[in-house]
Amino acid sequence: MIKDLNIFDIKSEDEFNHLSLKVFNYQYLSVPIYKKFVDLLSINPNEISNYKDIPFLPIEFFKTHPVLDKNYNYKFYFQSSGTTSTHLSKHFIVNEQIYEQSILKSFTTFFGNPAEYIFLGLLPSYLERENSSLIYMVNYLMKLSNHKENNFYLHNFSELDQIIKKTEQENKKVILFGVSYALLDFVEAFPQKLEHTMVIETGGMKGRKEEITKEELLNELKNSFQTHKIYSEYSMTELLSQAYSLGQNIYECPSWMRILIRDIEDPFCYKNHEKTGAINIIDLANIHSCSFISTQDLGKTYSNNSFEVLGRIDNSDIRGCSLLVI
């Protein structure tokens, strides 16, 4: 049974390949829109022996079709941010415990026990954006942490300023999650020097401020907060896993997630390491939707399986966490 796959304890490339093929064959039979997509490509699933040969579903299908395991009813869905209610991506969730396990395992891999941290959010509250996968993630980490200071402070910069000053004085471990433009707005209004607070930016400049490169953004945040590094989180509505950058805009994936870089002109051809192309993502936590997604993000990979996000393909839809507050 697909539910018996232990995707969160992958320890080798062979094991990742083996489980990827199992998930692919299950989703080919169980996710109708994915089966139709694979069949239209005239691909025989029985001939695929490596995860790099698995067909990747264009991410736009999450806007137009239910990408959902026909063997289950969904409990709720995550929805992408946008300025209208039409043509937004929906990711239907069958089992929220899979997402929560992915959140915890990934966070623990990169940062340790969430109970050790106070979590502050420069994000809308859960009640404001209950269909946001990002808000769900941060809210879940807050529940695991259970510190009294945990909260969302997008609409209350002054209280956030007071809490950070207090926790800094008390040498407490704090993580500040925030969309990029809100972090810039906050530190401009309340200059900070952070020694015990980690800043994790989650993207989100599109349509809010003058566009700057990711490197410029990280440098500006690093200088403004007077800290030695800014961390980043990379995920999206259509995923149930997160990659994290521990500085320098270089991301690392948990063991059940992979990044492949495809040629923009030929989606079945992959780029070598350090060559720019479009990002394909394998997220084995997406057991009941589609684990193999072709995105509109640009990036490059490195030999140690880390990767860099460089921007968006021209004329692709504007999307990003900054739209959460519109």
Image: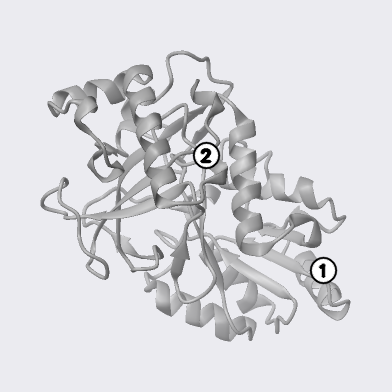
Q: Are marks 2 and 1 in contact (CB under 8 Å)?
A: no
Which residue sits at x=85%, y=55%?
147
Relative vertical location of residue 258 with respect to residue 132 in this rendering, above or below: below
Which residue sits at x=81%, y=77%?
168
Under mark 1, the amino acid is: Ile
Name the quadrant containing residue 3: top right
Q: Is residue 176 left or right of residue 106?
A: right
Relative vertical location of residue 61 with respect to residue 306 in this rendering, above or below: above
Which residue sits at x=34%, y=68%?
303
Circle 2 sits on which residue? 7
Label 2, label 1: how far apart the Cα atoms are: 38 Å
Circle 1 sits on which residue? 163
Under mark 2, the amino acid is: Ile
Q: Characterize the local packing of mark 1: few (<14), some (14-19) or many (20 or more) Cα atoms within 10 angstroms.
A: some
Which residue sits at x=59%, y=21%?
75
State how many labels appear.
Answer: 2
Q: Residue 294 got which mark? A: none
* Secondary element type, mark 1: helix
* Secondary element type, mark 2: helix
Q: Characterize the local packing of mark 2: few (<14), some (14-19) or many (20 or more) Cα atoms within 10 angstroms.
A: many
Question: How is the structure coloured here?
Answer: one colour
Q: Could you tell me residue 199's position as x and y percent? A: 63, 70
Counting residues from the start of the chain, the first of labels 2 and 1 encountered is 2
Q: Is residue 299 left or right of residue 103?
A: left
Q: Could you tell me residue 205's position as x and y percent? A: 44, 63
Comparing 35 with 165, the one in front is 35
Comparing 223 with 29, the one in front is 29
Q: Could you tell me residue 131's position as x and y percent? A: 57, 35
